[in-house]
Amino acid sequence: MQVEHKRGKFVQADSTTLLSNEEIKIPFLRKMRPYIILSPAFLLTIGILIPFGMAIYYSFTNFSFKYAVYNWIGLENYISMFKDPEFWHSVKVTIMYAGLATVIETVLGVIIALLLNRESVIAKSLRIVLIFPLVIAPVIATLIWQLMTNNSVGILSKWLRMVGVDNFTWGADPKTALFTVLVIDAWVFTPFVILLVLAGLRSLPKAPFESAMIDGGSAWFTFKNLTLPMIMPMLLIAVLFRLMASLQMFDIIFALTRGGPGNTLMTLPLTAYTEAFTYKELGYSLPYMLILWAFVYLISHYMVKYWSHTQKKASGK
Amino acid sequence: MLLRKFLAIIISLVVGIVFSACSNSTQSSGSSVEKTELKKLDGFDWKRFKGEEINVMLNQHPYAEAIIKRLPEFEKLTGIKVKYSVTPEESYFDKLTTALNAKNGNPDVFMTGSYQLWEYAPAGYIQELDPFVNDKNRTSSDYDINDFFEGVLNADKWDLVPGHKVGTGNLWAIPLGFEINVLHYNKRAFEQAGIKNPPKTFDELIEIATKLNGWNGEGSYGIAIRGTRSWATIHPGYMTSFSNHGAKDFEIENGKLVSKLNSSKSVEITKKFVELIKKAGPKDWSNYTWYQVSSDLGAGKAAMAYDADNFSFYNNKEGASKEAGNLAVAPPPATKDGDVGSNMWVWSIAMNKSSQKKDAAWLFMQYFTSKEHMIWGATQANVVDPVRKSVWENQGFKERISKIEGYEETFKSIIDNSTIKFTPQPEFFNTTTEWAAALQDIVNGADAQERLNQLANDINKRVERLRVK
């Protein structure tokens, strides 16, 4: 007897209904099983949505830690923010920082991963050593770099003086502050890109590369037409993670310069923090965070879409 | 379908919770200066609140260490149990502000700086202390509030009117210890360079500091000064010279607070200060916090430092630093005729307005600001500078500070002109942080007058937001 399951009813091939769901008594716990399994995710969603909803609400108020009373002020915080030249400056700095950090780390990460993708003793040892910066908290890494770049006692400043560069003041000069934080960011996070790309490289099939070698394909030809398209999904994940984290970067900049010199490195997260905790203007700081959230959301949304597309392409679908 | 319904319920629940939470907050926010009604007590007794438990929030600091060390004695004397937390300064005030904003009475007592009172008092977070201090049934007869230095105690008084000076209105906290800003110099550096006396004027300071660049080999320089993009850059040496020069941060004009940071006096002293930094300060000055200033002085990198007077106290202790024993103290250099004073930083102890155990909390505050604890702290621990006049007359303390050349003399010469030189107003941290950013810009080449005009303009916009009269 052929039985087909159609919208909750068991139906015989000649369309005679045998038993309905109501007639089969499913135990309550079994019915609830999907929700029980999903409940941690629901709780997590609530845990995320409550502060998020509160952030939206407070962004329409003049809530400040400095006053006992706050009022609903509509779009005033948003209007002030968009009118403030410092906001546009922080958007510019955030985009520059995130863009440059992501590009530098991706390019460096791919090059180093390609160099480490061999079975020599040096490559094996370097694979372990290069991961070290990733296990150091960014704030600690920044403090180490702060010492190394200190003009009186820093080893890097000493080396620069030895080669005749006397007045390089790293994070203390507006002209070199962005460069300095990018160096630290690259030092801490390039290993993350290396790890992902290396994992991608080591999972590639050997056959296409052997064919290319037999056909006399150059190293650049192989990289451009085989390696890069095949590791693209991995690379995009690395780019996505780095871009999102760089847009939200706070700790390295705060620990090194607090956004200075002047306003040179005042990114969106730093401005939001300063408004909320130094100036105690929580209501005014929240639009900065919500704009940043919108940035991150939009970019990640389109990148995830593009990633799905490249994954299909890489698997030949 | 069912899943969508379920999600819709969840989202509605969240929206409901958010809005009810928010509306609750609106209702709970009350008037900021409600008077506290205290019940009448019959005579003073340390044991009256035996069995109560209070929560105390402390910043990681030698003053806090002194309190923690003597907690068992306090608990034995009063029978009050003390639960405390210690937080590093970097995150202390963030944590404290959010705790006070919760208005749940925890902590009952907390350490605070006087500048923070200008935010906490108008918000209604702090208990005014006059009803406690003036009540003989609550305050021990030997407490003697008049023993505190006037300028130091005044730092914790304010009438909540932006623009009115400290020293007016309620007492919001009791001082634990304070810092005045002085010139520290390395006697070895001065001897090597043939300089006999510390500089008395700002021009002399620039000249001597420039001469001392490189005094101790590569990387050594004339004078260490704070420089980060933080309010903490403004309040020590810079504000001391700023006020000694006769410049003002604000004035009240037509009932409005108006920034005077672009006045001619302000521009003059800012230019002088910037000249000092450029000629003899650390090259990476804008990375310098109090920690770098103090450690460069102690390590023999900086020949001088213009900062809190306790730097020499801590660095001069045997074994505490490379230059221990070589450091001496002089008054801040003058920019014009007349007596010099100093801006002041005061660590104090305050009571949460929402505390349910105010009398027990007051006993705690009283004990740890008493003459007896202050003398112990100044002679056996590191509670410097002591806030009570009697401690400065104590032989043990006098002997202790006599090891630092110029310490006591400098203190005595400037204490009468020293207090908080800023104009109290709730946007203090905003205005001073922006001020530090402007100072950084000027050191990096911006025109002083133009940048200070822009700063004054920005600050005027900020103070327009003030919601207290």
Image (cartoon, rainbow, N blue to C red):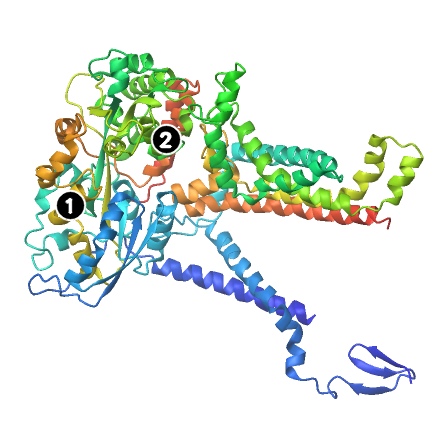
The residue drawn where x is 8% and y is 37% is B393
Residue drawn at (28%, 40%) of the image: B115
Residue at the disc numbered 2 = B292
The residue positioned 83% from the left and 31% from the top of the image is: A219
State left or right for residue B193 relative to residue B458: left
Residues packed near mark 2 inside 10 Å, few (<14), some (14 to 19) or many (20 plus): some
- The picture places residue A132, in percent across and down from the top left corner, at 58, 41
View extreme (right): residue: A215
Q: Which mark is residue B374?
A: 1
The answer to whether residue B59 of the structure is visible from this angle is: yes
Whether A46 is drawn above or below B313: the answer is: below
Return the x and y of residue A211 as percentages of the image width and height.
Answer: 92, 40
- Counting from the top left corner in percent of width and height, residue A199 is at 72, 46
Quarter placement of the N terminus of chain B: bottom right
- Please state which amino acid type lies under the numbered disc 2: Gln
Q: Is residue B71 above or below residue A236?
A: below
Whether residue B323 sits left or right of residue A94 in the image: it is left
Task: Please give the name of the residue rendered at 43% of the width and 19% of the height, measured from the top-left corner.
Answer: B446
The quarter in which the C terminus of chain B is drawn is: top left
* Dot 1 amino acid type: Met
| Mark 1 element type | helix
